[in-house]
Image (spheres, grey):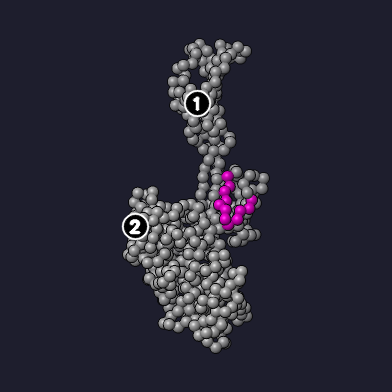
Amino acid sequence: MRTITTILFFFYLSFVNSQVAICGESDQEIFQRFYANQPQNTTNTTYDATTKYVFNVKFHVVYNDNGTTRTNSLGEPGIPIGFDEIMNAIRDLNVAFNQFNIYFKYRGFDQINDTNFLELETNEEMNDLRSIYSTQNCINLFIVNGTVNGAVARTQFLDDNWFIRKWTLCHELGHFFGLQHVFASYNGVCENAPRFSDEIGFNANTAGDGIVDTHAWGNTLENNFIDCNYVGGAVDCDNRAIMPVILTTENNFYIDGPPRNNFLAIEPYYTNCQPIFTPGQGRRMRSAITGYWAASFAALMTSVESLYEPFEVIGFGGNRIISVHDNGDGSGFVCRDLKIKHRFQKGFDYVFPDNDGVTDLINWNPDQVPENSNHYFNYTVIINQIDPANAMTILLDTRGQHCEFEEFVSGQDVITDYLGSYVFTVEEWDSLKVQDPNLYDYLQKNKYHIIKKVTDKGTIYQVTIYKQ
């Protein structure tokens, strides 16, 4: 499987723009790999738009050999990449791709302690990193600190400063699913402005990126935006006007402005405008998934049901104490009823109908990491992006008990000659005394001692003894 996925994922070096060399992927290589043996006009073909494709994603963050720093050869320390940054990445992917019924299941992240791979200078280094550290049956994304063979990102490999940008991550995964840059051209043939097949100069289905509803790449007047809406003025390479808005009845595509705010462009000039994929790009990606490389893509997929499953299951103790044992060393061994906390990945609108009546929230948005920890029985979850009318059941097994050590922090000794007597003395113990391993040696002889010890979590251990 590794050999097949290596062929699928790797593309040769191509510089996009000398000033903003964002991506190192070659459009010609992408075309040859995905579409050379298929009809070029994949935009207008009939295809299955409803089947849901769910891909496993595993993240790998490269560190220095010492496992604590990420400083590269230029002395740059790198930016912190941890759980929050990874969760934001899985969120951004799902929010951008879900509209095409393409989903991503978070399979965790790990740390690679290998300075040799902190910067990737050659194709061989990229292949070695992928070969050594990839997790099978996953899309593996590697976050480095520095060059990715002359670029800042190449499909699976991303510099940390660019990994945290929604545009870069979605751009690279667009390549992964067969998208070319919107400014692509072949053999010097540029894409013309006309979008209708009966217009003179129409070549949008065979030139550029081969997708009709991404505009031709125009001149600098593409910067004519008002409130993120293109207002016209740009022209193509043959001086044809690129129109602001086009609604075609021929293919039912809605085209709004030139492609500079597209995910497959150079990173948007308009930082306040959200980058987009077009419907045609969605068709292209889905066609790639079911095309020549279908078997390779299928090996990376999982079930739709997996999206409903928590990515983390944590057992913890409830409020019901089952047993307490004094270890004699200042601590107690406490067993409680078992409770389970489930955590779910970002990127979806979750609804937990059975949370009504418990303290867990019912509704969660794509920016949140949902947590459920107050159920003793199975409960249901709805993901609106999958099916707002369908609830899946989360199985919950709370049989058993959760046991852990707890430190005694205070105590009390009620001392009396006879149990039930009204004559007694009370001695309060601080943490030093209650943790003293020789405590019982110091108790008064020929007395009853009603001893109570309290742990740092409020658990009470009580015992009555007679000290001879």
> What secondary structure is marked by label 1?
helix
On the image, the x and y values in percent for residue 288 come to: 48, 71
Viewer-side residue, 280 vs 377: 280
CA distance for labels 1 and 2: 51 Å
Give the vertical position of 242 relative to 228 (above or below): below
Q: Which amino acid type is shown beneath numbered disc 2? A: Ser
Q: Which amino acid type is shown beneath numbered disc 1? A: Ser
The answer, for residue 208, to whether it is visible in the render is yes
Give the image quarter of residue 341.
Answer: top right
Which label is found at residue 413? none
The answer, for residue 286, to whether it is visible in the render is no
Residue at 49% across, 35% down: 404
Which label is found at residue 73? 2
Figure quadrant of the N terminus: bottom left
Residue at which label 1 appears:
431
Viewer-side residue, 389 vs 111: 111
